[in-house]
Amino acid sequence: MESLMLLYQLLFGSTKHIS
């Protein structure tokens, strides 16, 4: 389940950037 972690990190990073 490495893809899930990568996807999550990408989403999290994007959210942090927007915040």
Image (spheres, helix red, strand yellow):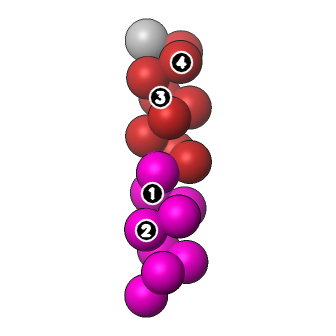
Say if mark 1 contacts mark 2, CB within 8 Å: yes
Q: Residue at x 46, y 51 (%)?
A: 9
Q: Where in the figure is residue 16, as x and y percent of width and height?
A: 44, 23
**Location of residue 1 (image quadrant):** bottom left
Q: CA distance from mark 4 to mark 3?
A: 5 Å
Dot 3 corresponds to which residue?
15
Q: Secondary structure at mark 3?
A: helix
Q: CA distance from mark 3 to mark 2?
A: 15 Å
Dot 2 corresponds to which residue?
5
Q: CA distance from mark 4 to mark 2?
A: 18 Å
Q: Secondary structure at mark 1?
A: helix
Residue 2: in magenta span: yes
Dot 4 corresponds to which residue?
17
Q: Residues within 10 Å of mark 4 (few under 14, many from 20)?
A: few
Boundaries of the magenta span? 1-9
Q: Secondary structure at mark 4?
A: helix
**In the rendered picture of this protein, how many numbered marks are placed on residues?**
4
Left or right relative to 3: residue 19: left
Callout 1, which amino acid? Tyr
Q: Residues within 10 Å of mark 2 (few under 14, many from 20)?
A: few
Q: Residue at x 45, y 57 (%)?
A: 8
**Location of residue 19 (image quadrant):** top left
Q: Earlier in the sequence, mark 4 or mark 1?
A: 1
Callout 3, which amino acid? Thr
